[in-house]
């Protein structure tokens, strides 16, 4: 397998997302196509993650809600890049039809594939899928509102 190209490195991601450790769950963006409204992010899952200490420590599994959060963060980057401005952030509005299909364990690389179904100046909706290799680990429909930072902080 060849090295993945990096479209947004971690420095660019933290310019867009307000998340920080331990809640920043995207390591890099490897694809971004604003004409097709698609984005692909990557999350390297390691045993050093704090949640593995308490989430089935003898058989460590990444919590499903954190897989959804990783998908939402990649979706938020797409929504922000397409319709936001420097002073706006994409805030989670809804999660629908979430399904968990394959366990995610330490050592896995999550590919977070997101396709915009509606993207506008006030927010958007996306279809999001998380893969481990060729296996679909989770999927959901996720909605966002684009909100001015001053309206949150």
Image: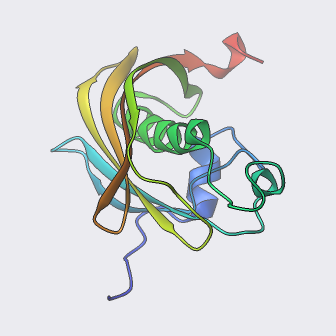
Q: Is residue 68 left or right of residue 101?
A: right
| Residue 49 position by quadrant | bottom right
Reply above or below: 7 against 95. Answer: below
| 62, 28: nearer the viewer | 62
Query: Which color mode does the image show?
Result: rainbow
| Residue 53 position by quadrant | bottom right
Give the residue displayed 43% in from the left and 71% down from the top: 6
| 65, 76: nearer the viewer | 65
Reply above or below: 55 against 18. Answer: below
Residue 45 coordinates in the image, percent (x, y) = 60, 65
Q: Quadrant of the image for the C terminus?
A: top right
Residue farthest along the left direction in this orientation: 36
Residue farthest along the front direction in this orientation: 58
Residue 60 coordinates in the image, percent (x, y) = 68, 60
Reply above or below: 63 against 10. Answer: above
Residue farthest along the bottom direction in this orientation: 2
Give the residue displayed 76% in from the left and 56% down from the top: 52
Give the residue displayed 62% in from the left and 44% down from the top: 63
| 76, 121: nearer the viewer | 76
Give the residue displayed 56% in from the left and 28% down from the top: 89
Q: Quadrant of the image for the N terminus?
A: bottom left
Q: Is residue 40 left or right of residue 94?
A: left
| 24, 103: nearer the viewer | 103
Residue 147 coordinates in the image, percent (x, y) = 56, 16
């Amino acid at each position: 397998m060849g090295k993945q190209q990096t479209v947004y490195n971690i420095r660019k991601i933290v310019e867009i997302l307000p998340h920080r450790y331990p809640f920043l769950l995207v390591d890099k963006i490897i694809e971004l196509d604003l004409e097709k409204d698609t984005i692909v992010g990557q999350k390297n899952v390691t045993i050093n993650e704090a949640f593995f200490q308490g989430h089935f420590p003898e058989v460590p599994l990444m919590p499903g809600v954190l897989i959804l959060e990783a998908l939402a963060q990649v979706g938020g980057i797409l929504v922000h890049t397409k319709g936001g401005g420097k002073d706006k952030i994409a805030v989670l509005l809804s999660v629908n039809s979430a399904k968990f299909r394959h366990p995610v364990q330490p050592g896995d690389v999550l590919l977070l594939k997101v396709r915009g179904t509606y993207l506008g100046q006030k927010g958007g909706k996306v279809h999001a899928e998380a893969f481990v290799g060729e296996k679909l680990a989770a999927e959901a429909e996720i909605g966002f509102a684009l909100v001015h930072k001053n309206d949150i902080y």
